[in-house]
Amino acid sequence: MKTSLVVGVCCIAGVLATACAPRETAQPRWTSRSLRKESVIVKVGQHPQSFERAVTKVVGCRYLLYLPRNYGVEKGKRWPLMLFLHGAGERGDDLTLVEVHGPPKLIAKGRDYPFIVVSPQCPTGIWWSLDVLNALLDEIIASYAVDEDRVYVTGLSMGGFGTWGLAIERPERFAAIAPVCGGGDPWQADRLKGVPAWVFHGAKDGVVPPKKSEEMVEALKKVGGEVEFTLYPDAGHDSWTATYDNPKLYEWLLAHTRRKRGGS
């Protein structure tokens, strides 16, 4: 799956170049063209300037796609979509790694889900790219019978961070989220006050401290968000096995439909 993104860029000359750099992806191909209509004025000395260019970036990734057993049987039926984001240990170019944990593991063992399940793989050495994930969702929604009012995102560890990050960037896309042993930016919690969240963590997690989840939960409560928190008292970093083995998680997700809201 490869998708072109067109991004308008505008910044003031003199700002560090990194401030205008595109979001990191797995070696994206990108081009830019100037939108300047007037000629460049050259004057000696230091003067305020600005520029504007259109940036086109091609992104893509490999992913596992699961379609429910009865998909396509009932004409016109739209299906809920669950996006699953794996942890750092499953990065690479071997999709069997994605089946090590979470819903892909259970699907491989024969479990049937009432969702379309999309499980992308992040390349080695980088973090989840929100540009790639949003483009992947666009691709799936355009290609399959997706109920856009029932789109959910969940992930573990690095994928838990990715879940928070994606939902914060595009809260209007999701009916509910379920981050597992991850963390986010508490100061942006107000963007999620309309997105129900069920947060999971192990109290003895020595990789991602439970404080990371606790900070997000408290921040959501302060802005009036709908949030549930499960802290497993005896679990370490692996808080995902109990979470994804629990049928109540999927019942909870399906009980939520996207609320009509803005993206800010």
Image: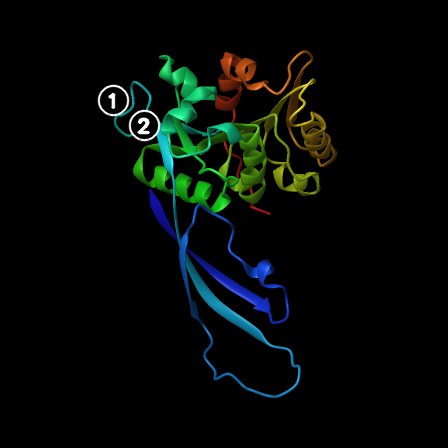
Circle 1: element type: loop
Badge number at residue 236: none
- The front one of 59 and 164 is 59
Looking at the picture, how far across and down is residue 24, in whole percent? 50, 49
Q: Which residue is drawn at 60% across and 36% down?
A: 194
- The answer to whether 145 appears left or right of 28 in the picture is left
Q: Which amino acid does label 1 sit on?
A: Val
Mark 2 crowdedness (10 Å alpha carbons): few <14, some 14-19, many ≥20: few
- The front one of 91 and 254 is 91
Mark 1 crowdedness (10 Å alpha carbons): few <14, some 14-19, many ≥20: few
Q: Which amino acid does label 2 sit on?
A: Lys
- The answer to whether 199 appears left or right of 29 in the picture is right
Q: Name the residue under label 2.
A: 77
Circle 2: element type: loop
Q: Residue at x 42, y 18 (%)?
A: 105
Residue located farthest toward the bottom when viewing the structure as drawn: 43
In this rendering, the answer to whether 240 lies above or below 30 is: above
Badge number at residue 73: 1
Q: In which quarter of the image is residue 118?
A: top left
Q: Which residue is drawn at 47% across and 76% down?
A: 36
Q: Look at the numbered discs 1 and 2 and tell me whether their residues touch, using CB distance below 8 Å.
A: yes
Measured in 3D between alpha carbons, the distance from the residue under mark 1 to the one under mark 2, in whole angstroms, is 8 Å
Q: Residue at x 36, y 17 (%)?
A: 108
In this rendering, the answer to whether 163 lies above or below 188 is: above
Looking at the picture, how far across and down is residue 217, in whole percent? 69, 29
Looking at the picture, how far across and down is residue 254, in whole percent? 48, 22
Tell me the quarter of the image containing the N terminus: top left
